[in-house]
Image (tube, rainbow, N blue to C red):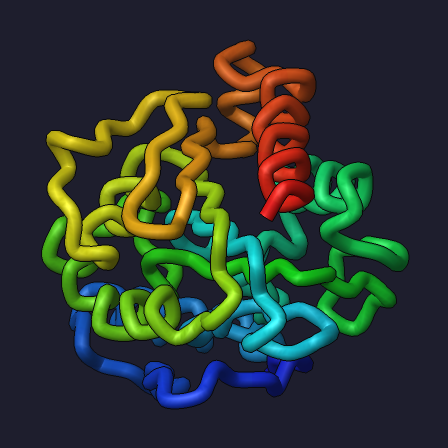
Amino acid sequence: MLQHLNKTVAAGCPEPSYDCGLCPRLHDFREEWRKKEPLWYNGPVKPFFPIGGANSTRLLIVGLAPGLRGANRTGRPFTGDYAGNLLYSTLKKYGFARGIFEARPDDSLELIDTTIVNAVRCVPPENKPTGAEINKCRQFFAPLLHSLPKLTAVVTLGSIAHQSTIRALGAKLALHPFGHGKITEIGNIRIFPSYHCSRYNTNTGRLTELMFHEIFSAVHDYLGKN
């Protein structure tokens, strides 16, 4: 079994156990894959924190859930599938990461003032968590959002991650609808919604590399002023 190498935790934040059974469907799906691939991580994926620790986080990136052959396999968000290639190259371009991304959790990649987390910690069948599963997992996601003292910006990747973020911050979805590049603010946090950096979205042209870079360019400029 692969172990998540990033041991930093945010103070006071609960983490699901490796054998978390709060969502029976997700638990059973994980158990199936533990039997099929016993050397994979196959557990709730923890946040990937910056080199300065959780409390240095200024930017939070929120994905939907671990990819089956990505984070579910490697134990680190966006590591092991196409989405990570685009995400981490973009983070390096705008100074939010350094080192070499080799799509494995023991590479030399380090995050700078940035934390990456999934709204749902466990891999769902067909990459589609149910509403109940999203809501259940918010008990781990919401405390993180409220425990990062320097958090100023959030990038939400896709509509489900965006909606869960809005709910975790205690705001109304109607006042903060999802739309690529449709920036909104809740309290002192500015939210930058983006289409998810999945292979499907880039192959269909829904999200181009330029569009994705524009999101992080805006984040970079915003943080530079705050």
Residue 90 x, y percent position in the rendering: 73, 37
> What residue sits 42% from the left and 42% below the top?
190
Residue 133 x, y percent position in the rendering: 18, 60
Is residue 10 depicted above or below 67 in this figure? below
Residue 70 or 217: which is nearer the viewer? Answer: 217
Is residue 221 depicted above or below 114 in this figure? above
Residue 216 x, y percent position in the rendering: 63, 34
- In the rendered image, the quadrant that contains the N terminus is bottom right
Query: As drawn, which residue projects farthest toward the top?
Result: 205
Is residue 185 depicted above or below 105 in this figure? above
> What residue sits 60% from the left and 29% below the top?
218
23 relative position to 97: left or right: left
Residue 224 or 94: which is nearer the viewer? Answer: 224
Q: Quadrant of residue 65?
A: bottom left
Q: Is residue 196 visible?
A: yes
Q: Quadrant of residue 178?
A: top left
Residue 148 x, y percent position in the rendering: 46, 71
